Image (cartoon, rainbow, N blue to C red):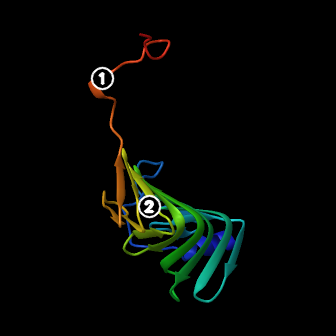
Amino acid sequence: MIEFLAMAFFLAQPTAPAPATDGGTRPPMLGNVALNNPVEITAKLITGERNSATFTGDVQVKHRTLDLKCDKMVAHYTSAREVTRVECTGGVQAQDGDRFARGERAEYDVPSGVLVVTGSPEARQGTTYVTGTKVRLTLGSERLEVENARIIVETAPAGGAKKGKGGAKKP
């Protein structure tokens, strides 16, 4: 029952249906209910209230291209059980494609797909590592915004130096 409630109230904007095993296309199903853009959540404890639910203990969220982990998450939703906003605290880690962000807090605006990480946030995209006061990721885009940024770009070794079987050459 808890799994149904957790999945049912996490409905967001529609996406293309997932391919079916019979060659057609249909959205994922939960019993007899078709799910558009479902969110999969695991946590040790779920506590639900009228307009929110609190997930605690090893919280893991999968929504569209986003993988989000944290210690505690509060999801705010409408009377129709559509989630509008998610707040995460403690050990926040988010991955969206080649973009990774971590910090102590995060807010995720579900309809817009914007995740904002704060609390000594760090981000990585490809070979670029960034720190700042606020990291903003937008799902489904390559956009990464960092306020008060400090950037470190990793580069390949110069001159195409190759290491031999035993490591670096001795003089």
Toward the viewer: 48 or 135?
A: 135
Q: Amino acid at mark 2?
A: Arg
* Amino acid type, mark 1: Gly
Label 2: how many residues lie within 10 Å, few (<14), some (14-19) or many (20+)? some
Q: Residue at x 36, y 58 (%)?
A: 150
Direction left: furthest residue: 159
Q: Dividing the picture into quarters, in which one does residue 74 lie?
A: bottom right
Q: Is residue 110 visible?
A: yes
**What residue is shown at x 44% (from left), y 61% (from top)?**
64
Q: Residue at x 37, y 18 (%)?
A: 162
At horizontal 43% and vertical 70% (from top left) the residue drawn is: 116
Mark 1 falls on what kind of element? helix
Residue 160 is labelled as: 1
Numbered disc in front, either 1 or 2: 1
Q: Pick the quarter of the image with the N terminus.
A: bottom right
- Picture coordinates of residue 65 (x, y %)? 43, 57
Q: Nearer the viewer, residue 84 or 164?
A: 164
Label 1 to label 2, Cα distance in Å?
Answer: 38 Å
Left or right: residue 149 compared with residue 78: left
Tag 2, which secondary structure? loop
- Percent position (x, y) of residue 117? 46, 68
Disc 1: CA contacts within 10 A as few (<14), some (14-19) or many (>=20): few
The C terminus lies in quadrant: top left
Q: Which residue is mark 2?
A: 64
Whichever of labels 1 and 2 marks the residue nearer the N terminus, that label is 2
Residue farthest to the front, as pictured: 171
Taking 61 as reference, is 112 above or below it? below
Residue 73 in picture, x, y percent from top left: 60, 72
Q: Is residue 1 visible?
A: no
Relative to 72, is 28 on the left or the right? left
